[in-house]
Amino acid sequence: MDVTTLALEAVPKTIAYASLAAAAGATLVLRLLTALRQSGQAAPDPAEARACRLGRIAALALLAALLLRLTGHTVAAFGASDAFIANLSAMAIDSRWGASWRWQIGAALLLVVVTVPGRYSSDARWIAMAVAVAFCAATTPLLGHAAGSAGRVVTHAAHLLAMSAWLGTVMVVSLLTAGRAPVASGLSTALVARFSPVALAAAAVVLASGLVALCFYLTSPGDLLASTYGRILVIKLAMVAGIMACGATNWRRTRSGRPPALPVIRFEAGLALAVLAVTAVLGETAHP
Amino acid sequence: MLLLALSLPISLAAHMKLSRTLPGADATLSSPPETVQLWFTQAPDPAVSRVAVTGPTGSVELGEVQVVEEKSISVRVPAGVPDGRYVVSWQAAGDDGHIQKGAFAFTLKRTQ
């Protein structure tokens, strides 16, 4: 695959993964903030409205990224010719994957709809967002390496949903603790403390589903170093190990009652974005 | 979910590959082919499959891409194409939707 084709395919995919992760993170943060408020551990905080706003921006970015991805995929396949509309129609309507494109775009539209401002309770909001995020994660593997096998689709959906909840929450917490009106130190400590067990469970699902996926795509452990696909996977695993180390650092701090180290959260969020970009490239790389 | 995944039928994943062609790659033919046919390791989608043939007089006008067997596509070649070297460029996509592209050549040299 040449560099132009890789860019046309992987850049929109990276934006889509990051947007889905941010939407999942906003959903989980909204759930955690609501639980803290309901348990009396925190007063109503503008962070809830900020999490809703981030979820809305992420939903719109996901929809835009999917449309960009469809365009990039069409141009990568047929070139940027005069027959672009006909080619786009062939890809999104006539081809075997037309339904998969439409399901994905429909799921993103649902996410946009449930994040529209309105007089909903936080509980109703996060539940609706969680359903839409799960729908987006379930439809994403219908295109790409997992397509054509129910087992691979389920494994990828579990991997994507857990990865989005874990890395997306890190990204959203990083954004909420930055800017002109960051959340108070006490609230960020309580938020990270509540998130830690969820992150641990999500990381376990990411690793377990990743191991299952390894069995689909690698013929032997030697492929990890002997193939391009394997080497990119090793880079991804090294980055994930870095994210786990960052998470462990802040988990230890909050367990001892200290606030989380914000530079560590920001570094973790940056690594999370890099992991999503590497994942997008991996999805375009041929298996051994 | 993972238990469900493991309980479902799973095949080792791979991109679709070209398995053989007719005419064969680098073959020399004594009469013009009626069709160019390509076989793949997965069923190609006709909506995104393309075949183009370039010969000594430029691009050859071909018929529509047809799926003729489960994992094969074919295009009709017009009669009366001149002798010379022909390059067949193709693109197709299998189960994962990734577009695969390739080319092969054959030579037409009529016996006198």
Image: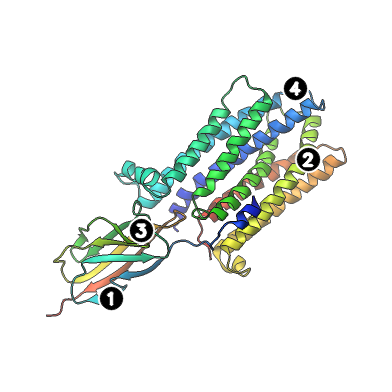
| Label 4 residue SS | loop
**Is B90 rendered above or below residue B30?**
above
Instruction: Look at label 4 and name its amino acid.
Output: Pro
Question: Quadrant of residue B111 in the image?
Answer: bottom left
Q: CA distance from mark 2 to mark 3?
A: 52 Å
Residue placed under numbered mark 1 in the picture: B27
Chain letter for the residue marked with disc 3 in the picture = B
Question: Quadrant of residue A182 in the image?
Answer: top right
Q: Which of disc 2 and disc 4 is earlier in sequence?
A: 4
Are there few (<14), some (14-19), or many (20+) residues within 10 Å of tag 1?
some
Do tags 1 and 4 sit on the same chain?
no
Residue at 62 percent of width and 53 percent of height: B4
Chain letter for the residue marked with disc 1 in the picture = B
Q: CA distance from mark 3 to mark 1?
A: 20 Å
Residue placed under numbered mark 3 in the picture: B91
x, y (%) of residue A131? 60, 35
Residue placed under numbered mark 4 in the picture: A44
* Residue A179 visible, this orientation: yes
Chain letter for the residue marked with disc 2 in the picture = A
| In the foreground, A177 or B31 | B31
The mark found on residue A261 in the picture is 2
Q: Are marks 1 and 2 in contact (CB under 8 Å)?
A: no
**Is A52 rendered above or below residue A228?**
above
Q: Which of disc 1 and disc 3 is earlier in sequence?
A: 1
Instruction: Look at label 1 and name its amino acid.
Output: Ala
| In the foreground, A71 or B31 | B31
Instruction: Look at label 2 and name its amino acid.
Output: Ala
| In the foreground, B19 or A148 | A148
Q: CA distance from mark 1 to mark 2?
A: 67 Å
Q: Are marks 2 and 3 in contact (CB under 8 Å)?
A: no
Left of A149 or right of it: where is B106? left
